[in-house]
Image (cartoon, helix red, strand yellow):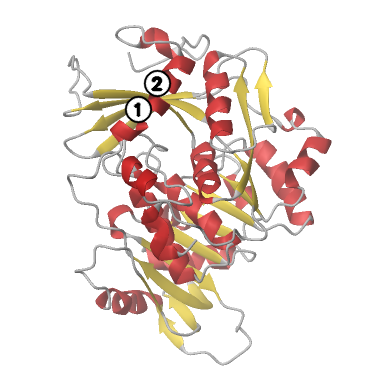
Amino acid sequence: MLFSSPNATPSPLSLLPSPPPSPRRSLSLTLLSKAAMSSSSTSERAIAPQSPSPLPESRVVLGCGAVSVDFLATVSAFPRPDDKIRSTSFMVQGGGNAGNALTCAARLGLTSRLISKVANDNQGKSIIAELAEDGVDTSYIVVADEGNSPFTYIIVDNQTKTRTCIHTPAYPPMVPDDLSRSSLLSALHGARLVYFDGRWHETALVVAKEASKMKIPILIDAERKREGLDDLLNFASYVVCSEKFPQAWTSAQSIPSALVSMLLRLPNAKFVVVTLGENGCIMLERSLDEGFELEDVNIESLLESLKQRVDVNSSAPTCISSKTSMRLIAEGVGGVCGRLFLGTAEKVPPSELVDTTGAGDAFIGATLYGICAEMPREKMLSFAAHVAAAGCKALGARTGLPRRVDPILAPFSL
């Protein structure tokens, strides 16, 4: 059954074909079996540890957004209506955009804090326990006495390498009164960055306003148009978008034109990134040279010229940028002074591609690290693509996320 009653949400476990162990036990079993689920990673990583370079001096990241329990089932092919099929594998794991991104950031070495809300049920306890195990500070997660924690059924299609999500949100939702003033100030203390995934928009806006007063940069995940997102974007220092968001939000005729439009509408934003899945990403960064005479360049033509410079034979992620700041013009939109970056995705062999769940969250988690570490933009985008690709080689959003000492991160000298 794919629908749940808005008035009475059944436990996710009661809807499974045969009752599995309790969520906490399932989670423990999942954590123990991650090595088996990952296509190439865990044993190799344990054999070849490396000494990492010093961590970023300012590395506290506060996130505000969604957490969840993910019930992942892989199938040989997506079912047709009225079909009865069997899964080929099954996993219970923590999820949610903010939960995934901050788990990624914590594994890379950042000090992650999370503002969110769960219920005092087995799912909520599992969510908090798994985050804490990965080093995320969960002391700012609100626990409701009643209601249900959020959960998601995820069907992973082995044939098309796609995933379908059926989400049941938390109840009751988070509201500003859930977060005391003292907790808010404590959460923001020492933060280098604040990250929002667009959920809990009323609470998020309170946090964003306070962070802005404290001059803490803000990164926003613009996955899709959501209630309250427009207000939140006004505080954005950095924006990372899904492929469809820029044009949906601006009504521009193309993605490059939409990026120009976004920087014009968001005067505080330093850069906007749009992720394009296997086609990589595009970033438009604002320049501070607006007072100088700059060359006018059509952004569509510039992007095409960058594409011509891509090494199609390289499997590793790379990034190509316009050499200098220029005035980038989008027809019918206007112009902005800045640099354009084109990042490629890592080419994951079909035999190694398992599940794209949480790939965008992994990209954001790595971007948070890149900003804290003050990576050059080209290195940051390649690093984020590499981390996202690693997450796609195992089932679930978190199983394949690398840790700081993972040998696969050696090229980036973390």
| 100, 154: nearer the viewer | 100
Residue 56 drawn at (x, y percent): 61, 60
State whether residue 321 is above or below residue 215.
below
In the rendered structure, the answer to whether residue 159 lies left or right of residue 390 reads left
Residue 4 visible to the viewer: yes
Query: Do tag 2 and tag 1 residues touch (Cβ < 8 Å)?
Result: yes
State whether residue 297 is above or below residue 150.
below
Residue 72 drawn at (x, y percent): 34, 26
In the rendered structure, the answer to whether residue 269 lies left or right of residue 360 reads right
Q: Mark 2 = which residue? A: 29
Picture disc at residue 275: none
Residue 382 visible to the viewer: no
- Residue extending farthest to the right is 182
Q: Which quadrant would the N terminus be assigned to in this image? A: top left
The residue under the point 19% across, 15% down is: 82
Mark 2, secondary structure of its residue: helix
In the rendered structure, the answer to whether residue 295 lies left or right of residue 132 reads left
- Residue extending farthest to the front is 47
Q: Mark 1 = which residue? A: 33
| Callout 2 crowding tier (Cα within 10 Å): few <14, some 14–19, many ≥20 | some
Which amino acid type is marked by label 2? Leu
| 20, 273: nearer the viewer | 20
- Residue extending farthest to the bottom is 293
| 100, 181: nearer the viewer | 100
Residue 172 drawn at (x, y percent): 62, 20
Inter-mark Cα distance, 2 to 1: 6 Å
Which amino acid type is marked by label 1? Ser
The residue under the point 36% across, 7% down is: 19
Residue 52 drawn at (x, y percent): 51, 58
